[in-house]
Image (cartoon, rainbow, N blue to C red):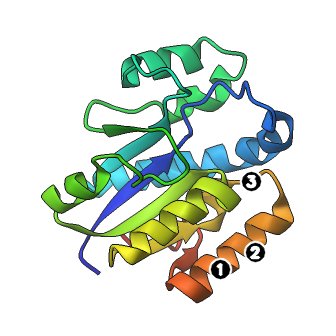
Amino acid sequence: MGSSALVVIDMINTYDHADADLLLPSVTQAVPAVVRLLDRARSQQVPVIYVNDNFGEWRSHHGEILRTALSGDHADLVEPLRPDDDSLFVVKARHSIFFETPLAYLLGQLDVRHVVLCGQVTEQCILYSALDAHIRHLDVSVPRDAVAHIHEDLADAALRMMERNMGAEIVTVDTVHF
């Protein structure tokens, strides 16, 4: 593996969407693991990149997205994950973190060859992002305790697909290697 980056996907969130009630229990379980992962990455000086939906607000930027999420009903799930001053932030509009974003360019500039994906939703954005990382010849790790799902059975299938079809390393926060 080359140098690594931690990519936090869609965790700056208001949870004001159709599947939120199904997602929130899993997010609540994943947040402490994501916090531990962030702490490990930061202590090892691994780049932390937040890639987040813009929720259709095309004039928004990362500060506005964060402020909106922190003023919502689920700020308690966002506050512990707040980007620090060294964090990078990429705004996306679709499921994959790579689709029409500058992320591939940014990873190239950082000489990153290995991405650790955490966040939500396992069976959607995590899966599609892992596939897009794989086709870009990046090594992928997914800590299963640091991803949240809407449907547990689909999340389990997605993790198996990432491991089998994309060569992703499915790990835990405590065993992930940067």
* Left or right, residue 76 beside residue 156: left
Q: CA distance from mark 2 to mark 1?
A: 6 Å
Q: Which disc is residue 161 wearing?
A: 1
- Measured as percent of width and height from the top left, residue 40 is found at 41, 55
Q: CA distance from mark 1 to mark 3?
A: 15 Å
Question: Which quadrant would residue 61 be assigned to in this image?
Answer: top left
Q: Could you tell me if the residues under marks 2 and 1 are in contact, i.e. CB atoms within 8 Å?
A: yes
Q: CA distance from mark 2 to mark 3?
A: 11 Å
Determine whether 64 is above or below 86 in the image: above
Say what amino acid the circle numbered 2 marks: Ala
127 or 24, nearer to the observer: 127
Say what amino acid the circle numbered 1 marks: Met
In what element is the residue under mark 2?
Answer: helix
Dot 1 or dot 3, earlier in sequence:
3
Say what amino acid the circle numbered 3 marks: His
> Which residue is identified by label 2?
157
Residue drawn where x is 48% and y is 22% of the image: 66
- Measured as percent of width and height from the top left, residue 6 is found at 39, 56
Residue drawn where x is 39% and y is 76% of the image: 135
- Measured as percent of width and height from the top left, residue 109 is found at 14, 56
Q: Could you tell me if the residues under marks 2 and 3 are in contact, i.e. CB atoms within 8 Å?
A: no
62 or 170, nearer to the observer: 62
Classify 10 Å Cα crowding around label 2: few (below 14), some (14-19), many (20 and above).
some
Question: Which quadrant would residue 20 be assigned to in this image?
Answer: top right
In what element is the residue under mark 3?
Answer: loop
Dot 2 or dot 3, earlier in sequence:
3
In what element is the residue under mark 1?
Answer: helix
Q: Which disc is residue 149 wearing?
A: 3
